[in-house]
Every structure is written in structure tokens, then in C-alpha cells.
Image (spheres, helix red, strand yellow):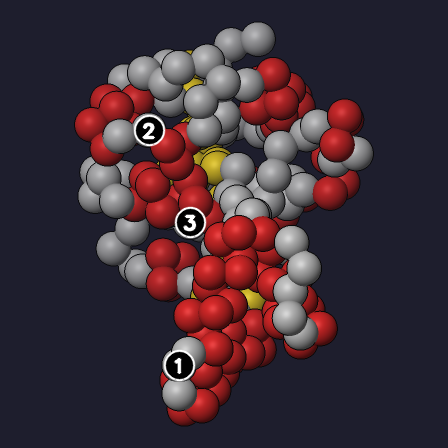
Amino acid sequence: MELPSRLIEAAVDQMASLPGVGRRTALRLVLNLLNRSDEQVDAFAESFQSMKRGIHACPQCHNLTEAEVCSICADSARNESLICVVEDIRDLLALESTRQYHGKYHVLGGVISPMDGIGPNDLNIETLVRRIASDGKTNKETPTEVIFALPATMEGETTAFYLFRKLANSEVKVTVIARGLAIGEDLQHADEATLVQSLRQRLPYTT
């Protein structure tokens, strides 16, 4: 469709660049913003600019935070011996919503996918390996179990196998959440009851 202004066209292009937003939806959102007051639009834009400036990855687990480390890593009440490995932030949030997991996390930032040009070096794998290595830390601080909570897809299984091989020389126990999830289903799309059962019924990881 031909739009009446290049400025509207540019705004629609930017809005449509977001995942899951088509051009019709983008146009509807842009026109909604156009009808708002200057103050509302300024506040809208400022919230995103502040987020971009203020949010960074936690240096320990790669969760998102505006503090030095994320609230989960900073929480002394969390179980230091458990690390749950997830693909991205959405999976972390899905597990947290169950309120049944009280360990720590490690966010990979994706899964190994040669078709998409994503290899092990593109993911947060080496920081996980360093977290598992004791490096002189006390037993209380050293993880004793790593839980793979990765997608039930070929890419997820490939990533889990790669991680298992990387951790093979450590003494950490490697488990995987029970497959209450359908093959090919993303973790963040599962209901809370399924996630709870998958965590509780986790199994030793086998190749």
C-alpha cells in the first residue's frame, strides 16, 4: 500500500522490523502513536532508549540486568549447586514463573544451528565451562548438577550433546528435564504444570 508520507513509511518500516509484526500491524501501531500527545510519544521513545542504555548481560549467567549482576545470581538464598542451562531469556522467565526452581541459571543465547550459521563459539558456552570448574572455589560455591532445559529439537539435542562432551571431564552431574514437552516445542510455550513436572522428573543425561 502507498502511504501518504515518507516519515510514516520510515516509521512503519522500523515497526515492521520487529519479530512477528507485519506491515498492517505496524501501520496500525504507528497511527496509534501519531494520535498520542507529544509527551506520551516522548515517554514511549525514552523508555526504549533507557532500556538500551541501561540493560546489559549478567557477567555470570548472561541473564539481563541493570545491576552489576542479575537478581538471581545475587540472591544468596538460591541453590548454588544447581545450574539450569536454557536457550534464552524467555526460557528462564518461563521456568521462574513456576516458582518451583530455586537454583541458578546459565543463558546460552541460542542453540547450535549450522543451517543458521550458529556454532559453539557464538554461544555462552565457555563461561558455563568456567563456572563448572572449581578453580579453587569452596565446595559450597561449586555446582554439583547441571540441568539441560533446552528445546526438544534437533538443534537443542545437538547443543546438549556438545555441552555434555565439554563437561565430560568435570565431576558435575548432568541431567535433562523430563520430556513432558512435545518434540519441536519451545520451552517458553509450555504451560507451567508441564514445566514443573519436567523439572521434578529430570533424568540423567545420556547420549
Frontmost residue, 194 versus 160:
194
Residue at 23% x, 39% y: name it.
98
Q: Which mark is residue 166?
A: none
* Closer to the eye: label 2 or 3: 2
Q: Is residue 159 above or below residue 137?
A: above
Viewport quadrant of the N terminus: bottom right
Residue at 49% x, 18% y: name it.
184
- Residue 164 position by quadrant: top right
Q: Residue furthest bottom?
A: 39
Residue at 73% x, 43% y: name it.
122
Residue type of the residue flagged with mark 3: Glu
The residue where tag 1 is placed is 36
Name which of mark 2 and mark 3 comes first in the sequence. 3
Q: Secondary structure at mark 1?
A: loop
Q: Secondary structure at mark 2?
A: loop
* Closer to the eye: label 1 or 3: 1
Q: CA distance from mark 2 to mark 1?
A: 36 Å
Residue at 33% x, 29% y: name it.
190
* Closer to the eye: label 2 or 1: 1
Name which of mark 2 and mark 1 comes first in the sequence. 1
Viewport quadrant of the C terminus: top right
The residue where tag 2 is placed is 190
The answer to whether residue 95 is left or right of residue 155 is left
The residue where tag 3 is placed is 141
For the question of whether residue 161 can be seen, the reply is no
The answer to whether residue 202 is left or right of residue 41 is left
For the question of whether residue 6 can be seen, the reply is yes
Residue type of the residue flagged with mark 1: Arg
Residue type of the residue flagged with mark 2: Ala
